């Protein structure tokens, strides 16, 4: 960055930051919100999935579920280490929130967050059995894949690198869910469509609103590139195609 170029211009033109000391207050606030949402969602998601490991129909399924819990926790830790460079007490953080907390199944909070942490709203809902968990993991896993493709280009380089390392791990989680759903269908298990109908609108809400005011600000800071609705449309089209191949329908 040249002396003549302002930080805003530098970021708007694709510049990157690499050190907490160079991050201005407004940028820091948005960066911390992004990281906190990811970490809280991963930890809450892992906690919820941990509760259904033993519902798996076989040893292979239980091993896969346990691996997903382990890797989601590790992914959260990767980003939490970056947050620690901004002064976050990472040791206290993991024990500070009730990661297993859930609302009633029929609650409807849209995209709003709970009052306990910054997890995406979808992670406030409980899983109901193995089939439900597989469906949720498939729909949300594909949403995370779309979102990480966006976040892997953020202007804070250490975070972008972390997201690029995390992306293939999360993509594999959705692949495991797809394999699991196919296996359930082959076994004649019912209930998948009902779970899709339940989880689809809740996962869709995780992409946020279509309002552009905040997006424009984030884009200027290099923290976003693609509008929410474009990401949501990509997820809906790709995930809908996967479901259609299994004889299922988008919710």
Image (spheres, helix red, strand yellow):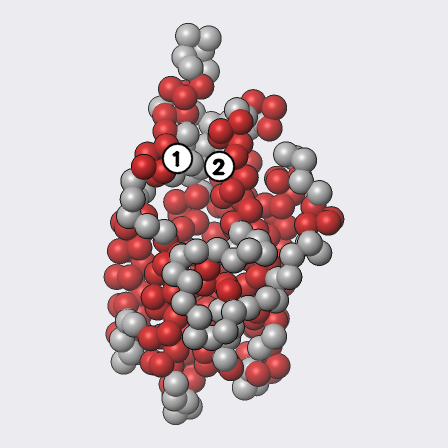
Q: Where in the figure is residue 200, as x and y percent of width and height?
A: 35, 68
Answer left or right for 61 relative to 4: right
Helix, strand or loop at disc 1? helix
Q: What residue did someone put label 1 on?
A: 218
Q: Is residue 47 above or below residue 150?
A: below
Residue drawn where x is 36% and y is 29% of the image: 220
Q: What residue did someone put label 2 on?
A: 30
Front-lying residue, 160 or 210: 210
Q: Is residue 119 above or below residue 178?
A: above
Residue 160 in view of the camera: yes
Answer left or right for 251 relative to 122: left
Question: Residue 150 is drawn in which quadrant?
Answer: top left
- Mark earlier in primary sequence (2, 1): 2
Residue 47 in view of the camera: no
Quarter of the picture containing the C terminus is bottom left
Question: Residue 11 is drawn in which quadrant?
Answer: top left
Residue extending farthest to the right is: 91
The span from disc 2 to disc 1 (Cα, nearest Å) is 8 Å
Answer left or right for 150 relative to 161: left
Residue drawn where x is 53% and y is 32% of the image: 28
Q: Where in the figure is residue 136, as x and y percent of width and height?
A: 44, 70
Mark 2 vs 1: CB contact within 8 A: yes
Residue extending farthest to the bottom is: 188
Front-lying residue, 132 or 105: 105
Residue drawn where x is 43% and y is 56% of the image: 112
Q: Is residue 58 above or below residue 101?
A: below
Front-lying residue, 62 or 135: 135
Q: Where in the figure is residue 171, as x and y percent of width and height?
A: 45, 59
Q: Which mark is residue 91?
A: none
Graded by Cα atoms within 10 Å as few (under 14), some (14 to 19) or many (20 or more), the crowding at tag 1 reads some
Helix, strand or loop at disc 2? helix
């Amino acid at each position: 960055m040249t002396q003549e170029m302002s930080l805003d211009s530098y970021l708007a033109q694709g510049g990157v930051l690499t050190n907490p000391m160079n991050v201005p207050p407004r940028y820091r606030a948005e960066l911390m919100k992004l990281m906190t949402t990811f970490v809280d969602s991963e930890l809450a998601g892992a906690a919820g999935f941990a509760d259904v490991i033993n519902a798996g129909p076989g040893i292979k399924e239980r091993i896969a579920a346990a691996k997903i819990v382990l890797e989601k926790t590790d992914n959260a830790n990767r980003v939490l280490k970056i947050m620690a460079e901004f002064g976050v007490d990472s040791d206290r953080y993991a024990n500070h929130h009730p990661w297993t907390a859930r609302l009633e199944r029929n609650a409807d909070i849209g995209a709003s967050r709970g009052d306990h942490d910054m997890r995406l709203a979808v992670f406030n809902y409980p899983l109901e059995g193995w089939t439900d968990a597989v469906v949720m993991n498939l729909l949300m896993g594909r949403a995370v894949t779309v979102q990480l493709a966006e976040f892997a280009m953020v202007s804070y380089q250490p975070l972008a690198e972390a997201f690029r390392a995390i992306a293939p791990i999360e993509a594999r989680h959705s692949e495991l869910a797809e394999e699991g759903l196919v296996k359930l269908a082959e076994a004649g298990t019912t209930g998948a469509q009902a779970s899709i109908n339940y989880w689809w609108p809740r996962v869709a809400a995780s992409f946020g609103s279509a309002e552009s005011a905040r997006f424009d600000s984030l884009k200027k800071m290099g923290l976003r590139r693609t509008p929410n609705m474009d990401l949501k449309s990509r997820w809906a089209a790709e995930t809908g195609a996967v479901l259609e191949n299994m004889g299922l329908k988008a919710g």
